[in-house]
Amino acid sequence: MSACPALTRIVAARDGGLCRIRLPGGVLHAHEAAAIAEAATLHASGVIELTNRANLQLRGVRSGHEAALTARLLQAGLGPQMPADTPHTIEAIDGIRNLMISPLAGHDPQALCDTRALAAPILALLQSEPRFATLSPKFALLLDGGEQLMAIDHPHDIWLAAMPADYDEPRFAVGFAGCPSLEAGSALAAVVQADVPALLDALLHTFIDLAGTDDTRMRNLLVAHDAHVLLQRAADRVGIALQHGSQIDAWRRAPTDPTKRLGAHPQGDPQRWYAGGQPLAGRIDAATLRELGALSARHGDGSLRVTPWQSVLLPNLTANSVEAALSGLHALGFACDPAHPYAAIVACSGSTGCAKSAADTKADAQRLAALLTHDRTTSSAVHLTGCTRSCAAAHCAPHTLLAVAAGRYDLYQRADTSSEGRFGVCIAHHLTIEQAAAQLNRPARKSPDA
Ligand code: SF4
């Protein structure tokens, strides 16, 4: 049984039960936001977290309220779309909806493909094929449309990335157990866009065929199986022609810009804008979630996009409504400027929610935010983590504060080599938050390896 929280699997935490609500494509409608806010107030503490997989989780679910919470969320349409004849439980199906697309899918001016049209049949497939219910809830898929606002630093078991249109027909690069890279050589092969759903289907069946009991992730399978052989086996299964060659070997993913999640920007349709804001350390309360939905209903199309940077977007604004939407986000305490300290801080749930944590990382993040200078950049981002498990950040941040005692942290700086451990090089020990802020506010220092 997985320990991952889900809609029907409320996992015990220090501050009560933890319930995770998976949002297909990170999309949340105003009426769903209102339903979640009500459920979080009635059955939990009202604390809501935006996760780094663009989902939501409710903290502090009260003992005895678990079934009522789940029923309320399912009634609001937040569960998986179950085929009538499936032999599997909602719990099994809910956990496998791990398909990441850009939070700006369909609206990003740089996009090569509107991945929403591809994501819909893939999500339907994940929920309808009984064999896929045996996949680990951590098994993750990435469908990258080439958007500028795309998280490509989070490893995925299978990734597919749109290639530029200068090729003869739309196609997608394919890779395993990693991310599309800005460097050449990350793609195993490419397939035409029309073959993407069938190839993913075949790859998942092939994975299940070959996986041993302990092979829950693609990286486990690749210890004993060659990635090219595995991909060819899946392609042969459904008669898909894989494309190889120098163009695919030389393909590089175009650079992304995560700062585009903040502030107001035009969409692909120049008549429409989106506005984005970031709460401190990905945590909001029920009233804020309800108001976010209302804000989008007033000024946009009534939908929100949760991002893997633990922030939100309000899409489809008119030029006249942009200022009001930004004002609304500011009024809710969201940062809309990439230079704001909130944009640079990530923190795990810390000692109030997790017994493994040596410090209250969320409260310390708040203190740190007040002390950091307001000229942060992505390269000076800082991750506060209660232990080495690093739940809040899937990749190594430029700086990591690893809790060693209440209010005390070791400070790490990302190294230029892979030989310096998970968080890079430790540059200071046992710092208070004030001392950490003083270190972080200094001009950027070079890595010892540079
Ligand atoms: S990183 Fe460690 S302390 Fe923080 S939530 Fe995860 S397990 Fe708990």
Image (spheres, helix red, strand yellow):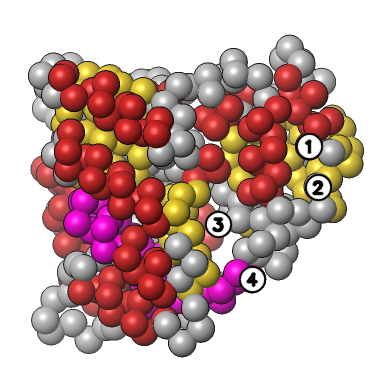
Q: Quadrant of the C terminus?
A: top right
- Mark in front: 3 vs 1: 1
The three-letter amino acid code for the residue at tag 1 is Ile
Q: What element carries label 1?
A: helix
Residue matched to label 4:
14
How many angstroms separate mark 4 from mark 1 (CA)?
23 Å
Give the extent of the magenta segment: 7-36
Q: In terms of sequence position, does the residue under pointer 4 or pointer 1 come before the other? A: 4
Camera-side residue of 68 and 358: 68
The picture places residue 383, in percent across and down from the top left corner, at: 64, 39
List the single residue furthest toward the top. 443
Please, is residue 444 above or below residue 436 in the view?
above
Residue matched to label 1:
433
**Ligand 1 within 8 angstroms of badge 3 C-beta:** no
Mark 4 Cα shell of 10 Å, populated few (<14), some (14-19), many (≥20): some
Q: Marks 2 and 1: in contact by CB < 8 Å?
A: yes
Numbered badge on residue 407:
2
Q: Marks 1 and 4: in contact by CB < 8 Å?
A: no
Mark 2 Cα shell of 10 Å, populated few (<14), some (14-19), many (≥20): some
User: In which quadrant of this rendering is ligand 1 seen?
Assistant: bottom right
Numbered badge on residue 223:
3
Q: Which residue is drawn at 11% across and 81% down?
A: 84
